[in-house]
Amino acid sequence: MFEAVRNNKRIAQIILGILIIPFAFFGMDAYFSDSATGNDVAKVGGTSITAYDFDQALREQQDRLRASAGGQVDRALLESAELRRVVLDNLVNQRVLALYAAENRLVVTPEQLQATIAGVPAFQEDGRFSLQRYENLVRAQGMTLATFEARLAQDVRVQQIVAAVGDGGFVPEASARRFLDAQLEERRLRELRFAADRLGAEAAVSEAEITAYYEANPGRFERPARLQAEYLVFDRAAVETKVEIADEAVRAFYEGNPQRFGVPEERQARHILLTLDGKAEQAEVDRVMAEAKAIVDALRQDPARFAELAREKSQDPGSASRGGDLGFFGRGMMVGAFEDAVFALEKGRISDPVRSEFGIHIIEVTDIKPSSVKPLDQVREEIVAELRAQEAGRRFAELAEQFANTVYEQPDSLAPAAEAVGLTLRTSDWISRDAGPEPFNNERLRNAVFGDEAVQKGRNTEAIEIGNGTLVSARVKSYEAARRLPLDEVRSRIVDELRREQGRKTALAQGEQMLAALAKGEQPATVQWGEERMLQRGAPGLPAAAMQAVFSAPAEPLPAHVGVQLPEGDYVIYRIESVKRPEIAADDPRIAAVAAQYAQLLAGRDFGAFISDLRQRYEVDIKPGALQVQQQ
């Protein structure tokens, strides 16, 4: 939600993408106040980044990684020093930007803040700002409106810095034109290919060569240690399947929570807002109140003018254009004084002026949805699911401890643990220390099952948490140590590799010989060039090395020839028949597009340099143990 608040300037968006953790989650106070919870992990310009700040940011980043990967993320990555470095660097970058904003007294006016909020798509319905939606979404984040707006103001301050740095990039039109000219250049060519596979297919391979290759490359023919494991998976789902919920419990829950299954009354209202500062002088209060009473008098004489006067008089940017309409809302969704007035009004009546923290409101209730209660049959499944989850939650901790204790106390078999908590014993396919199917894609579990306790002594692993509250214990069922495969078993692989290598060498030799002949002006009669094709520099149609060779070749004289050995071993000669350069009009819109893209690159570079300069200016001191990975 908060990312949408940002300014639409493209360069600023590109730069903000550099930072992983959104600024809007941190207010100015959060940047500069020292928390008492935990030790400092860094000092920036004399202010602290606490262990609490860091742990919270790390958890948020880990959650984002899990969500982006569907929950399947290697725990080693989530606990790595590299991830901790990225998170801490971002916290430091945020802090130096906040310090710079404070030092330069960057301010956000109420008008700027109001316009920013009104322009957020997440706060809009049918393309227009919705006060109800705004308040709902902010409260859903666990914040008051005042807290959110304070933090948003800090975000906009940082945006001002980002935009200022980003807008400093300048790309001359001539540079953009030269780049575009080069990208649009086309070359017509044919190719002559010396295929390594074909040339090596019939190569003779002696027994001595096979043996020598086998002895020289022992690591290539070693099969790593592998094992099959029996294992148990204990998770909340395993507990829930054993929980039965009686009809009496369902009915008791339903009858004991009438407000839960009732649809509360909702009202649709519209208002006219005259803003008034909470600290306004009495004279200003009297003036605004007199204006509000005049509007009330006018509306009571002609209620049909409400929408017209709202568009003309209301200072609420979200609802004024809609004639003051706020849509339907229930209790708890509006500020107190305003809400009390709405739910006290009869439909179609115009209220007296109502003062709230936003100013003076004139309100009309336009529709009412009365409260109602859903029947039990309609919510039965919902209640059963909730009661089952609650009961499973109560049982889960107890059974998890029992599971962990049983696999540890009876280490010679998983059967007692399976019987104790009602699990099914499973068997894995062959796994190695480096890879395995789920749940053995968890590195910690693989290390445990390949450990000496499991392999040498045949014991259960401990109950290992692999994520999302899931515990796994495993034991070795079958084990095969690492071994070098016998020569007879890998002979065909060695022959194929030797022939591929011989094919690469032959392709290179023949290709270079042909290229030398062409350079002398010879045109062997046996040469059969491929079909003619057109290639553009900006639209790669060949491997990178081939593109580099073709477009580095001189444009005169033609035809020109270049040769490249490709990664797979083929040697290819490209015959360049013609070169076509584009004609670009002075007002070609592509010039501006290229300049804009280049400016984005420059802006990113400049912003990186700016951050680096700020980190030196504000003396960043990262504590030695800040990036130390916590041991389990």
Image: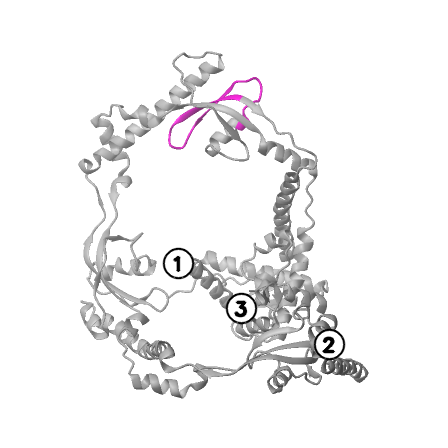
Q: Position of residue 615 (x, y in %)?
A: 62, 57
Indicate whether 136 appears above or below 58. Answer: below
Residue lying at 22% horizontally and 33% vertically, measured from the top left: 492
Q: Which residue position holds label 3? A: 53
Frontmost residue, 41 versus 500: 500
Figure quadrant of the N terminus: bottom right
For the point 68% across and 65% down, the residue is 115
Callout 1: SS: loop
Q: From the viewer's perspective, is 490 left or right of 160?
A: left
Which numbered tag is attached to residue 628?
none
Q: Earlier in the sequence, mark 3 or mark 2?
A: 3
Q: Position of residue 43 (x, y in %)?
A: 59, 65
| For discs 3 and 2, the disc positioned in front in the rendered view | 2
Under mark 2, the amino acid is: Leu
Quarter of the image that includes the C terminus: bottom left
**174 to 94, vertically: above or below:** above
**What range of the chain is rendered magenta?**
551-577
